[in-house]
Image: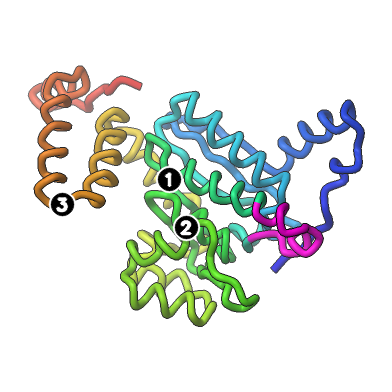
Amino acid sequence: MPDPDLSSQEQADDGPQEQLRERVREQSIVVERLATGAVAIWLNRPERLNALGVAMVNDLLVTIEQVITEKATAIVLRAKGRAFCAGADLKERQMMDETARHAHNRAINAAVNSLAAAPVPTIAVINGLALGGGCELALGCDIRIAAASAMIGLTEARIGAIPGAGGTQRLPRLIGISRALDMMYSGEPVTALRAQDIGLVNLCVEDDGLDAAVMRYMEVLGSRSPAAASTLKKVVYEGVEMSLAGGLERERQALSAIFGSADYAEGLAAFAEKRPPQFSR
């Protein structure tokens, strides 16, 4: 795993530190606004395989929260270079005391949980390695699209640890307890194709077709009602924590609210008039 040195911003005084923080934010996280109304958030430490250092994690959390307030129709998490994210920055961890390690882990948790709680669809686009905390970032998203060369796993067992940003909870819910424990006991990553077979990845495509596959998916998503998608996400995630009867009642209530919405009226009108609907954004 990558192990970059601590950022030089920590040695700067207050004035230059703020300027350095802005430069780090510009460099470590890149925001791209898509024509579909979605926003792509790019991890941008390719020289370190996008390892989750302190500055990068803090910047990622700020960016996610900002994008949510801007009411993007979807969030796409991507990465520059040959890896999605190789996990926590272990050299930084080695230089931390126990208090700082806990703080760093809480920050990674906050970023993953912010993605998971986003009121819009979230899509992780996985290229190369997605290990440890990088895998957990992907698990925090609703949908995962991976390049065929990607390797995905919770590798903490290799260093005598366990996943600490939701992996022990989200992976079993996604692929089942036995398969999840197998992956976590061994610490061995799986190929993108295997990940697709076990339900960890929704779609595995050839590397040179990754961008096109993502754009196709975003075009379809962009043609749907953002309000309906947001409601759907809320109902599904709330429902899986309820009894079946409770979930069905939650679904009924949500659909009743949608029946009175402008987007539903537009959808019915577009169907009758045989034209594409123009949903509110």
Q: How far is the residue under mark 1 from the one under mark 3?
A: 21 Å
Query: Which is more N-terminal, label 3 or label 1?
Result: 1
The residue depicted at 81 percent of the width and 29 percent of the height is 18
Provide the residue designation for mark 1. Answer: 116
The residue depicted at 52 percent of the width and 62 percent of the height is 207
Assess whether mark 2 and mark 1 are in contact (beta carbons under 8 angstroms). Answer: yes
Hey, which quadrant is residue 66 in on the image? top right
Q: Secondary structure at mark 2?
A: loop
Look at label 1 and name its amino acid: Ala
Measured as percent of width and height from the top left, residue 3 is found at 77, 63
Look at label 3 and name its amino acid: Ser
Measured as percent of width and height from the top left, residue 172 is found at 36, 67
Look at label 2 and name its amino acid: Gly
In this picture, residue 275 sits left or right of residue 112: left
In this picture, residue 93 sits left or right of residue 7: left
Provide the residue designation for mark 2. Answer: 166
Provide the residue designation for mark 3. Answer: 243
- Give, as a single range, the part of the protein colored magenta: 88-102
Q: How many marks are shown on the rendered structure?
A: 3
- Which numbered circle lies on residue 248? none
Q: How far is the residue under mark 1 from the one under mark 2?
A: 10 Å
Q: Residues within 10 Å of mark 3 (few under 14, many from 20)?
A: few
Q: Is residue 161 visible?
A: yes
Q: Secondary structure at mark 3?
A: loop
- In terms of depth relative to the viewer, which is nearer, 54 or 28? 54
